[in-house]
Image (tube, grey):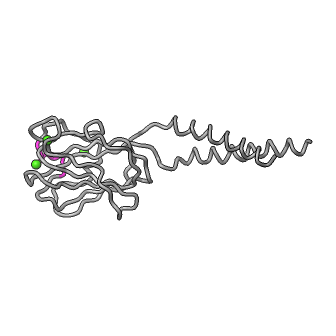
Amino acid sequence: MQFRLSAKTFAIAAILAVGVYSTSNAALITVNSVDGTGSYNNSVSLLTDGNIPGNGTGWTSDTNVWWYGTAPTFTLKFNSVYNVNDLLIQVDNNDDYRIDYSLNGTDWSTLHTISVTDGTVGWGMDTFTQADMHFSPFTAQYIRVQATGGDDMYAISEIQAFGTAAVPEPGTLALFGTGLLVSQVFRKRKESL
Ligand SMILES: [Ca+2]
Ligand SMILES: [Ca+2]
Ligand SMILES: [Ca+2]
């Protein structure tokens, strides 16, 4: 009897979990902080201000963080851990930019490198998304971008990530609530027998 109860509880919980996860849609991920290392021009806040200039905009535009050399790194920290399935990044068209991700800000994995030869424009800023980069979805709280080669003159105007929270709290609470409800119902039945 005990086994059947828990099996039924489990089945209902599993059905509910599928429902919770399938109804959650990828949305723009909230960024807690954006930081830069090394020497660069303009504020790193430009990277997450939602302003994406038109493709072909000059690399030293006021809309961009721009710099010389491959030393600088730019890191976004999300407000929690997310399953990320899309990125939007606009960079200078004639360079290589490596995108890394991390759960803790210490251990990094490389997601993708945008190559000089990628993209659609031959001058100024160029926009890339998952449709261009073809990476697999990943789980992270940090995204880091670094120029790795090109003409030594680099720029980024925007970095946006899209996905769903890795631990959806409303879903967890719903599962917990369902478990309580089911055990209450069965306890009441047992008492009435
Ligand atoms: Ca921007
Ligand atoms: Ca290019
Ligand atoms: Ca360049």
Name the spot of residue 82 as percent of width and height, x first: 43, 49
Relative horizontal placement of residue 10, taking residue 103 as reference (left or right): right
- At a point 11% along the width and 41% down the height, the residue shown is 124
Q: Main secondary structure of the magenta part?
A: loop
Identity of the residue furthest to the left in this view: 151
Residue 5, quarter of the rendered image: top right
Name the spot of residue 44 as percent of width and height, x first: 24, 54
Residue 100, quarter of the rendered image: bottom left
Vertical order, 177 against 103 (above or below):
above
Vertical order, 145 against 14 (above or below):
below
- Asked if the magenta segment contains residue 14, the reply would be no
Q: Which residues are magenta?
A: 58-65
Task: Pick the residue in front: 1 or 48.
Answer: 1
Name the spot of residue 74 as percent of width and height, x first: 25, 56
- At a point 33% along the width and 54% down the height, the residue shown is 101
Relative horizontal placement of residue 11, taking residue 141 as reference (left or right): right
- At a point 41% along the width and 50% down the height, the residue shown is 139
Task: Pick the residue in front: 125 or 110.
Answer: 110
Residue 42, quarter of the rendered image: bottom left
